[in-house]
Image (tube, grey):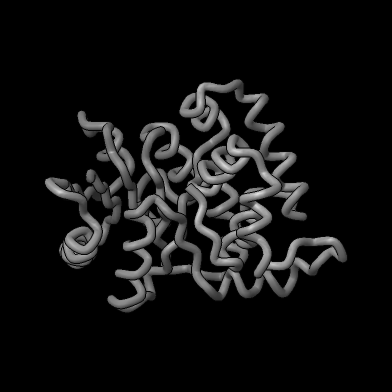
Amino acid sequence: MRVVLIDDHELIWNGTRRLLEEVHRELRTEGEVLHFTALRDVAQACALPQRDVDLVLLDYHLPGLSGLPALLHMRQEFEGASVCMLSAESGREHIRAVLEAGASGFIPKSYGEADMAAALRLVLRQRVYVPAEFLFFEDVVRGQEADEVRNEDLAQFLGSELSGRQRQVLALALQGLPNKSIARRLDIAEGTVKVHLSMVYRALGVKNRVAALCRVMQAGVVLG
Protein backbone atom coordinates (compact mmCIF):
# COMPACT_ATOMS: atom_id res chain seq x y z
CA MET A 1 0.00 0.00 0.00
CA ARG A 2 1.63 3.24 -1.18
CA VAL A 3 0.28 6.52 0.19
CA VAL A 4 1.49 10.02 -0.71
CA LEU A 5 0.59 13.01 1.47
CA ILE A 6 0.98 16.46 -0.07
CA ASP A 7 0.83 19.16 2.63
CA ASP A 8 3.13 22.11 3.18
CA HIS A 9 2.73 22.00 6.98
CA GLU A 10 5.35 19.51 8.09
CA LEU A 11 3.75 19.26 11.55
CA ILE A 12 0.90 17.40 9.81
CA TRP A 13 3.22 14.73 8.42
CA ASN A 14 4.01 12.73 11.56
CA GLY A 15 0.44 12.78 12.86
CA THR A 16 -0.94 11.58 9.53
CA ARG A 17 1.71 8.87 9.28
CA ARG A 18 0.87 7.61 12.76
CA LEU A 19 -2.87 7.48 12.05
CA LEU A 20 -2.29 5.76 8.72
CA GLU A 21 -0.06 3.14 10.36
CA GLU A 22 -2.68 2.46 13.05
CA VAL A 23 -5.50 2.12 10.53
CA HIS A 24 -3.36 0.06 8.16
CA ARG A 25 -2.56 -2.43 10.92
CA GLU A 26 -6.31 -2.98 11.34
CA LEU A 27 -6.99 -3.45 7.65
CA ARG A 28 -3.90 -4.96 6.08
CA THR A 29 -3.78 -8.36 4.46
CA GLU A 30 -0.98 -10.83 5.15
CA GLY A 31 2.42 -9.40 4.21
CA GLU A 32 1.15 -6.00 3.02
CA VAL A 33 3.42 -3.09 3.93
CA LEU A 34 2.52 0.59 4.15
CA HIS A 35 4.85 2.89 2.20
CA PHE A 36 4.27 6.50 3.23
CA THR A 37 5.74 9.56 1.48
CA ALA A 38 5.13 13.16 2.61
CA LEU A 39 5.81 16.10 0.26
CA ARG A 40 5.32 19.85 0.35
CA ASP A 41 3.80 20.52 -3.07
CA VAL A 42 2.52 19.10 -6.34
CA ALA A 43 5.83 19.68 -8.12
CA GLN A 44 7.64 17.38 -5.67
CA ALA A 45 4.96 14.74 -6.15
CA CYS A 46 5.28 14.90 -9.92
CA ALA A 47 9.05 14.42 -9.58
CA LEU A 48 8.59 11.08 -7.82
CA PRO A 49 10.11 8.23 -9.84
CA GLN A 50 7.56 5.80 -8.34
CA ARG A 51 4.11 6.39 -9.80
CA ASP A 52 2.56 3.14 -8.59
CA VAL A 53 0.58 4.86 -5.83
CA ASP A 54 -2.67 3.65 -4.23
CA LEU A 55 -3.78 6.82 -2.43
CA VAL A 56 -2.90 10.53 -2.64
CA LEU A 57 -3.94 12.75 0.29
CA LEU A 58 -3.91 16.27 -1.13
CA ASP A 59 -4.19 19.47 0.91
CA TYR A 60 -6.38 22.08 -0.77
CA HIS A 61 -4.14 25.09 -0.07
CA LEU A 62 -0.58 24.55 -1.27
CA PRO A 63 2.30 26.68 -2.55
CA GLY A 64 2.38 26.68 -6.32
CA LEU A 65 -0.34 24.66 -8.00
CA SER A 66 -3.24 24.45 -5.57
CA GLY A 67 -6.98 23.83 -5.16
CA LEU A 68 -9.01 22.24 -7.94
CA PRO A 69 -6.27 22.64 -10.59
CA ALA A 70 -3.93 20.68 -8.31
CA LEU A 71 -6.57 17.97 -7.90
CA LEU A 72 -7.07 17.65 -11.65
CA HIS A 73 -3.32 17.56 -12.24
CA MET A 74 -2.75 14.83 -9.64
CA ARG A 75 -5.55 12.73 -11.13
CA GLN A 76 -3.77 12.93 -14.48
CA GLU A 77 -0.29 12.27 -13.10
CA PHE A 78 -1.35 9.39 -10.81
CA GLU A 79 -4.13 7.94 -12.90
CA GLY A 80 -4.43 4.68 -10.99
CA ALA A 81 -4.56 6.30 -7.55
CA SER A 82 -7.44 7.52 -5.43
CA VAL A 83 -6.98 11.25 -4.78
CA CYS A 84 -8.63 12.40 -1.56
CA MET A 85 -8.76 16.10 -0.71
CA LEU A 86 -7.97 17.48 2.74
CA SER A 87 -9.19 21.00 3.47
CA ALA A 88 -9.62 23.45 6.32
CA GLU A 89 -12.70 24.76 4.48
CA SER A 90 -15.74 22.50 4.74
CA GLY A 91 -18.67 24.52 3.40
CA ARG A 92 -21.11 22.51 1.32
CA GLU A 93 -20.36 24.38 -1.93
CA HIS A 94 -16.64 23.83 -1.35
CA ILE A 95 -17.17 20.09 -0.78
CA ARG A 96 -19.45 19.82 -3.80
CA ALA A 97 -16.90 21.53 -6.07
CA VAL A 98 -14.14 19.17 -4.92
CA LEU A 99 -16.28 16.07 -5.49
CA GLU A 100 -17.51 17.30 -8.87
CA ALA A 101 -13.87 17.80 -9.89
CA GLY A 102 -13.35 14.07 -9.33
CA ALA A 103 -11.87 13.71 -5.85
CA SER A 104 -12.19 10.24 -4.33
CA GLY A 105 -13.25 11.81 -1.04
CA PHE A 106 -13.16 14.93 1.12
CA ILE A 107 -11.78 15.02 4.68
CA PRO A 108 -12.07 18.23 6.75
CA LYS A 109 -8.77 19.12 8.45
CA SER A 110 -10.77 20.26 11.47
CA TYR A 111 -11.46 16.63 12.39
CA GLY A 112 -10.15 15.17 15.64
CA GLU A 113 -8.13 11.96 15.65
CA ALA A 114 -11.11 9.62 15.94
CA ASP A 115 -12.99 11.14 13.00
CA MET A 116 -9.82 11.42 10.93
CA ALA A 117 -9.01 7.75 11.59
CA ALA A 118 -12.53 6.75 10.55
CA ALA A 119 -12.18 8.71 7.31
CA LEU A 120 -8.75 7.21 6.56
CA ARG A 121 -10.09 3.74 7.30
CA LEU A 122 -12.64 4.23 4.55
CA VAL A 123 -10.33 5.69 1.90
CA LEU A 124 -7.67 3.02 2.52
CA ARG A 125 -10.35 0.50 1.58
CA GLN A 126 -10.81 2.41 -1.71
CA ARG A 127 -14.15 3.81 -0.60
CA VAL A 128 -15.17 7.45 -0.85
CA TYR A 129 -15.36 9.53 2.33
CA VAL A 130 -17.83 12.43 2.43
CA PRO A 131 -18.69 14.38 5.61
CA ALA A 132 -22.03 13.35 7.05
CA GLU A 133 -23.26 16.96 7.20
CA PHE A 134 -22.87 17.27 3.42
CA LEU A 135 -24.89 14.10 2.82
CA PHE A 136 -27.62 15.41 5.10
CA PHE A 137 -27.80 18.71 3.26
CA GLU A 138 -27.95 17.01 -0.13
CA ASP A 139 -30.80 14.83 1.12
CA VAL A 140 -32.75 17.91 2.23
CA VAL A 141 -32.33 19.99 -0.91
CA ARG A 142 -32.56 17.28 -3.55
CA GLY A 143 -36.20 16.47 -2.99
CA GLN A 144 -37.79 13.19 -3.98
CA GLU A 145 -39.61 12.14 -7.12
CA ALA A 146 -42.84 10.24 -6.68
CA ASP A 147 -41.45 7.07 -8.28
CA GLU A 148 -37.95 7.32 -6.77
CA VAL A 149 -36.60 4.22 -5.04
CA ARG A 150 -36.55 4.65 -1.25
CA ASN A 151 -33.16 4.50 0.49
CA GLU A 152 -34.14 1.36 2.39
CA ASP A 153 -34.90 -0.41 -0.92
CA LEU A 154 -31.88 0.89 -2.82
CA ALA A 155 -29.52 -2.06 -2.16
CA GLN A 156 -32.06 -4.54 -3.53
CA PHE A 157 -32.79 -2.24 -6.46
CA LEU A 158 -29.12 -1.92 -7.42
CA GLY A 159 -28.68 -5.68 -7.19
CA SER A 160 -31.76 -6.65 -9.20
CA GLU A 161 -32.40 -3.81 -11.65
CA LEU A 162 -28.87 -2.92 -12.77
CA SER A 163 -26.75 -5.22 -14.91
CA GLY A 164 -23.45 -6.50 -13.59
CA ARG A 165 -21.60 -4.17 -15.95
CA GLN A 166 -23.66 -1.19 -14.83
CA ARG A 167 -22.84 -1.94 -11.20
CA GLN A 168 -19.13 -2.20 -12.08
CA VAL A 169 -19.18 1.13 -13.91
CA LEU A 170 -21.07 2.84 -11.08
CA ALA A 171 -18.71 1.47 -8.41
CA LEU A 172 -15.65 2.77 -10.27
CA ALA A 173 -17.30 6.12 -10.99
CA LEU A 174 -18.05 6.57 -7.29
CA GLN A 175 -14.38 5.94 -6.50
CA GLY A 176 -13.61 9.05 -8.55
CA LEU A 177 -12.22 7.34 -11.65
CA PRO A 178 -12.72 9.32 -14.88
CA ASN A 179 -14.60 7.68 -17.76
CA LYS A 180 -11.36 7.04 -19.65
CA SER A 181 -9.87 5.07 -16.73
CA ILE A 182 -13.09 3.13 -16.20
CA ALA A 183 -13.13 2.18 -19.88
CA ARG A 184 -9.51 1.03 -19.74
CA ARG A 185 -10.02 -1.00 -16.57
CA LEU A 186 -13.14 -2.75 -17.87
CA ASP A 187 -11.85 -3.02 -21.46
CA ILE A 188 -14.84 -1.24 -22.95
CA ALA A 189 -15.26 1.92 -25.05
CA GLU A 190 -15.42 5.28 -23.26
CA GLY A 191 -18.72 5.97 -25.00
CA THR A 192 -20.10 2.76 -23.49
CA VAL A 193 -19.14 4.01 -20.03
CA LYS A 194 -21.07 7.23 -20.66
CA VAL A 195 -24.14 5.28 -21.78
CA HIS A 196 -24.02 3.02 -18.71
CA LEU A 197 -23.68 5.99 -16.35
CA SER A 198 -26.52 7.86 -18.04
CA MET A 199 -28.80 4.85 -17.59
CA VAL A 200 -27.73 4.36 -13.96
CA TYR A 201 -28.25 8.03 -13.07
CA ARG A 202 -31.71 7.92 -14.62
CA ALA A 203 -32.53 4.79 -12.60
CA LEU A 204 -31.34 6.46 -9.39
CA GLY A 205 -33.23 9.66 -10.11
CA VAL A 206 -30.05 11.80 -10.14
CA LYS A 207 -28.17 13.89 -12.68
CA ASN A 208 -24.48 13.43 -11.86
CA ARG A 209 -21.84 11.51 -9.89
CA VAL A 210 -22.02 13.64 -6.76
CA ALA A 211 -25.77 13.16 -6.47
CA ALA A 212 -25.37 9.42 -7.14
CA LEU A 213 -22.66 9.22 -4.47
CA CYS A 214 -24.94 10.92 -1.94
CA ARG A 215 -27.82 8.58 -2.73
CA VAL A 216 -25.69 5.46 -2.35
CA MET A 217 -24.00 6.65 0.85
CA GLN A 218 -27.27 7.82 2.44
CA ALA A 219 -28.63 4.32 1.86
CA GLY A 220 -25.52 2.68 3.32
CA VAL A 221 -25.02 0.62 0.16
CA VAL A 222 -21.53 -0.79 -0.55
CA LEU A 223 -20.64 -1.28 -4.20
CA GLY A 224 -17.58 -3.08 -5.49
Left or right of 50 on screen, residue 171: right
Identify the residue at horizontal 55%, vertical 43% (top origin).
173
Q: Position of residue 205 (x, y in %)?
A: 77, 55
Q: Position of residue 25 (x, y in %)?
A: 17, 61
Q: Is residue 40 above or below residue 219?
A: above
Q: Position of residue 132 (x, y in %)?
A: 52, 73
Residue placed most toward the observer, 168 or 96: 168
Q: Can residue 10 be spotted in the picture?
A: no
Residue placed most toward the observer, 57 or 118: 118
Name the image quarter holding residue 43: top left
Left or right of 46 on screen, residue 163: right
Residue occupying the far right of the picture: 146
Location of the N terminus by quadrant is: top left
Q: Position of residue 200 (x, y in %)?
A: 70, 44
Identify the residue at horizontal 29%, vertical 55% (top origin).
7
Q: Is residue 73 above or below residue 222?
A: above
Identify the residue at horizontal 38%, vertical 75% (top origin).
110
Name the image quarter holding residue 206: bottom right
Left or right of 155 on screen, residue 12: left
Residue placed most toward the observer, 220 or 55: 220
Number of numbered discs overlaid on the protein picture: 0
Residue placed most toward the observer, 113 or 97: 113
